[in-house]
Image: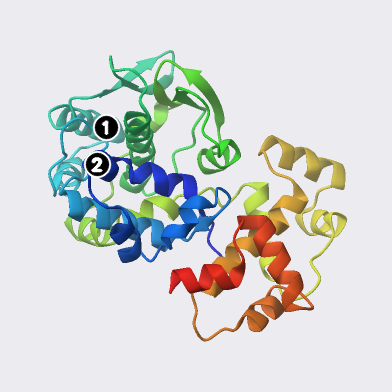
Amino acid sequence: MTHHTIAIHHVGQVLQGAERRGVATAPLLQRAGIPAALMEAPLARVSQEQYALLLRVVQRALRDEFWGLCSQPLRLGSFAQCCRLLIHAPTLGDALRVGFRYFHGELPDFVARLAVEDGLATVRIATPLPPQPSLLYAERTFMFFTFGVSSWLAARRIPLLGVDYRGPAPPNVAETARVFQARVRHGQPHFGLSFDARWLQLPMVQNAQSLREFLQQAPANLLVKYRDKTSVSERIRRLLRNHLRGEMPALDEVGRVLGMTPQTLRRRLREEGQGFQSLKDHLRRDAAIEYLARPDMTLLDIADQLGFSEASTFHRAFKKWTGVAPGEYRQRHR
């Protein structure tokens, strides 16, 4: 399985707190296995493992579970302590209220609230503070973690009806819609999620044992565990993954496998903010980034695994996708 990669934009956002506190970021990147020079390449990507490790590295360096993004640090162990409280709540709605009360006492910069009206549940993250970049990323991350932890507590993905973003649209708008699989509205006065209120009645199915396993893998498991695997783009990605080394099937062939006409397939992809060619390119790009972390594979091996007849063709394609040559990326990664 080839995992989705993370835009370098997120790496820069996480490092804002360290920069504000005067902590050198190059050693943090090195400990996370992220080449510092990638910060100068706007199209560059990192693996989910690198990004998750960076979150841990910055947490430890700053002794702050919110990476220095807020006006005061979130003490280490806060996330685990909150999760211990959540698993004893009877329903998802109760757990959300418990969690929001807990963090209200730990994070003074914003407040998360749950409201229910006319069968619609809404989570809103409110703050009187102006939309500064570091605070925006903190609020955005809190919203994402709320969604991920809620899905973990109920052991199923909570289907969202809408997502609100405070401030200007981030550079990776299409990826945001893909992660949440919901309509995203930018430029709103707050961050927020909305979903059918009946999901609030879901019973909590986690316990102390599953919590230990969850915390051992957090936050990496929040990035991947509850991704929507039923979307058309994800189904196509899994199908194409089996053809990386050879010629990938055309759109009409994929349509026949999925039981859709080419017109329906294109429409469904447009609704998910995707294109067929971009899906193929992104899959090859993500696979290449995974392969480049493997010292046992030469560039020629990687080119062959990705269906390129020559290493030079792979070199040009990778640089187009990421702004960095594959040999340079590998050298910096090491």
The kind of secondary structure element at disc 2 is loop
Give the CA distance from mark 2 to mark 1.
19 Å
Mark 1: amino acid: Leu
The reply to whether residue 44 is in sight is: yes
Q: Position of residue 90 (x, y in %)?
A: 22, 37
The local crowd at label 1, few if under 14, some if 14 to 19, many if 20 or more residues have their Cα within 10 Å, is: many
Q: Tell me the tag on residue 66.
A: 2
Q: Tell me the tag on residue 248.
A: none
Q: Residue at x 30, y 65 (%)?
A: 31
User: Mark 2 or 1 closer to N-term?
Assistant: 2
- In the image, is residue 64 above or below residue 215? above
Quadrant of residue 72 in the image? top left
The local crowd at label 2, few if under 14, some if 14 to 19, many if 20 or more residues have their Cα within 10 Å, is: many
The kind of secondary structure element at disc 1 is helix
Mark 2: amino acid: Phe
Quadrant of residue 70 in the image? top left
Q: Is residue 212 left or right of residue 243?
A: left
Q: Residue at x 17, y 25 (%)?
A: 108
- In the image, is residue 216 above or below residue 66? below
Quadrant of residue 96 in the image? top left
Q: Position of residue 201 (x, y in %)?
A: 33, 32
Q: Which residue is mark 1?
A: 96
Q: Nearer the viewer, residue 54 or 240?
A: 54
Q: Nearer the viewer, residue 194 or 173?
A: 173
Q: Residue at x 32, y 41 (%)?
A: 16
For the N terminus, the image quarter is bottom right
